[in-house]
Amino acid sequence: MFEKTGYISYGACGLPYFVGGLIDEPEDLVAVSVEEMAGKRDIQVLIHTQVISIDRDKKSVVARTLHSGEETTYRYTFLVIATGATPIIPAIEGLKTQGVCVLRTVEDGIRMKALARQSSRVCIIGGGFIGLELAEGLTRLNKRITLVEALDRLLPMLPTSFSDLVKQTLESHGVEVRLGSAIMKIVEEGGRVTSVIDANQKSIAADMVVLSVGVRPASSLGAEAGLLLGFKDGIVVDDQQRTSDKAIWACGDCVQMHHMITKKPTHVPLGTTANKMGRVAGSVIGGESVRFPGVLGSQVTKVFDLYIAATGLSFEEALKEGYAAKQASITKSDRASYYPGGKSNHINLVFEEKSGRLLGAQAVGSESVAGRINTLVACITAGFTLEQVNSLDLVYAPPVAPVYDPILIAANQAMKLV
């Protein structure tokens, strides 16, 4: 196993919480260390080692030891490419200024955490999940945060009213949110960031800038080897993660994925997806006949006290894909109305107008929205209609759900539009 950085088998999704101080040490993010991989699993791991080329005819790779520059050729019978994704770097003047950072690897997290200690005002460029999680974490470190998003709302997979709740939550905790704004220039003094300038020539004071505008497949190694690329230049694989070369597999964020609803290529870089793909690739190489079914884009996060979850198609995506789609939203307490401590769940269902087939779901509210979206993931995977969702025999007890669960209320409301 070759790894360019110094860490393997770590939870990248935990990096914002490491930067924000909820997780103390970078090693806390590691599931299996290099030593455990060698000692318990008999797998040789070469860290700080980058594979720079693949020779498909000779079935070999050239790996470079980054500390020394030494290059070594290794032969393979089977090869797995799991190079992940690379951050998208926007065209902004002054990107090489000290104080500008990205968050992708553990080393990125260590650098960002150290930089945050020396900073007081942070500009986060990009309002996706990572940007929002960093906004929360850095706010808890008493940093003044300005979150800049080029789109006119946060998290466009959500209904507008849900996006507004996310914005309100951020602002209620002191985060300044600027929508429909693009940063054009980073201003420095003495080699250090002092501010950023947006497209309207407005200045935002900042001594730290975080680039969080998304990622793209890290597929250049496969491309240079002549492997077939597809959506967003992800490596094309079949449902057993095999590439266009029968001796090479690829998995994780570097590959093109298959959407379970639209049946079209997509790219949804998530840790759960990467883990499942890796298991499929390893199992197939080991002689098993297993397949990866595709993705729905199921995701969840929290921003301060607001939990956000979604799966399947948003309303806009459903229309773009040609579905005669409708949507229905409800707000309902996550507990019986008379039981103390209840919080609102806002649930939106996206469905086909005639058949009533469920196409997607989004929710914001209390921690319980994650479980409710997971239930709807199962419904979408099984091809349920709204009527079938409405017939689910869901649990009820005053401390955990009202007699009619918010899922049932949402399905019943949606059925009125079919």
Image (cartoon, helix red, strand yellow):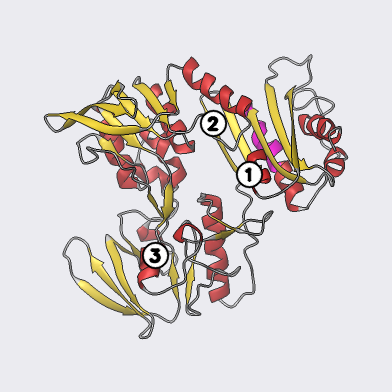
**Which quadrant is home to the C terminus?**
top right
Quote the CA–CA distance across marks 1 and 2.
Answer: 23 Å
- Residue under label 2, please give it: 302
- Name the amino acid type tagged 3: Gly
How far from the left and from the top, in percent, is residue 207?
A: 24, 26
Residue 39: image tag = 3
Which residue is located at x 37 percent, y 31 percent?
A: 124
Please tell me which residue is depicted at 53% across the width and 69% down the height of the picture: 282
Residue 53, image quadrant: bottom left
Q: Is residue 186 left or right of residue 356?
A: left
Q: Nearer the viewer, mark 1 or mark 2?
A: 1
Image height of 197 relative to 342, above or below: below
Q: Earlier in the sequence, mark 1 or mark 3?
A: 3
Q: Secondary structure at mark 1?
A: helix
Q: Position of residue 74 (x, y in %)?
A: 31, 78
Question: Is residue 373 on the magenta stretch?
Answer: yes
Q: Which residue is mark 1?
A: 317
**Mark drawn on residue 176:** none
Residue 356 x/y as whole percent: 83, 44
Separation of residues labelled 3 and 2 (CA atoms): 37 Å
